[in-house]
Amino acid sequence: MKLNTFMTIASIVAFLFGLAFLLAPVLVMSMYGVALDISGQYIGRYLGSAFLGIAAIGWFARNAKEDEAKRAILLGGFVVTLTGFVASLFDKFYGLGNALVWSTVVIYLLQAIGFGYFYFGKPK
């Protein structure tokens, strides 16, 4: 897979989750078997805002030339997805939620592998 294809897919995923969390955090989390109080809704909207920002960064950087800025974006994407993977795995084993939480674990894992591959492993 080419880097710009990966960045496009990662940006679309972040955009969809961001929009969903920004507009309907209660509905999104109910699909995972989690009820949100007003504080949870507040945090969910901030999460959506962050995902939308990540989506915009990835989308507009996807066709940039190879340079330090693009490498920084890849490293940032790796950190976000790796820590998201760890958090989602922790939530699956120790938190609330139903089997749909596994989809979040897998999404974060696949994206962490992709960002890691393009940052650390892809031959120049």
Image: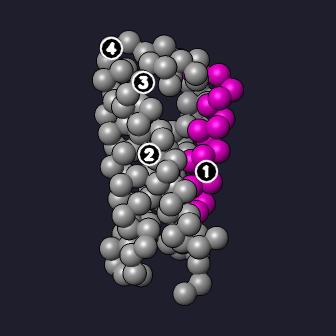
- Tell me if mark 3 has few (under 14), some (14-19) or many (20+) residues whose alpha carbon lies within 10 angstroms of its own: many
* Amino acid at pointer 1: Leu
Mark 2 vs mark 3, foreground winner is 2
Q: Secondary structure at mark 3?
A: helix
Q: Indicate whether 84 appears above or below 4.
A: above
Residue farthest to the right, as pictured: 99
Quarter of the rendering occupied by the C terminus: bottom right
Instruction: Find the magenta span and give its range.
Output: 96-114
- Nearer the N terminus, badge 2 or badge 4? 2
Q: CA distance from mark 4 to mark 3?
A: 10 Å
- Tell me if mark 2 has few (under 14), some (14-19) or many (20+) residues whose alpha carbon lies within 10 angstroms of its own: many
Q: Is residue 108 magenta?
A: yes
From the image, tell me which residue sits under label 3. 25
Residue 117, percent from left and from top: 58, 69
Residue 47 shows up from this direction: no
* Amino acid at pointer 3: Pro
- Nearer the N terminus, badge 4 or badge 1? 4
Q: CA distance from mark 2 to mark 3?
A: 14 Å
Q: Looking at the picture, tell me which residue is in the foreground, 54 or 84.
A: 54
Mark 1 vs mark 2, foreground winner is 2
* Numbered circle sitting on residue 2: none
Q: Indicate whether 102 appears above or below 74.
A: above
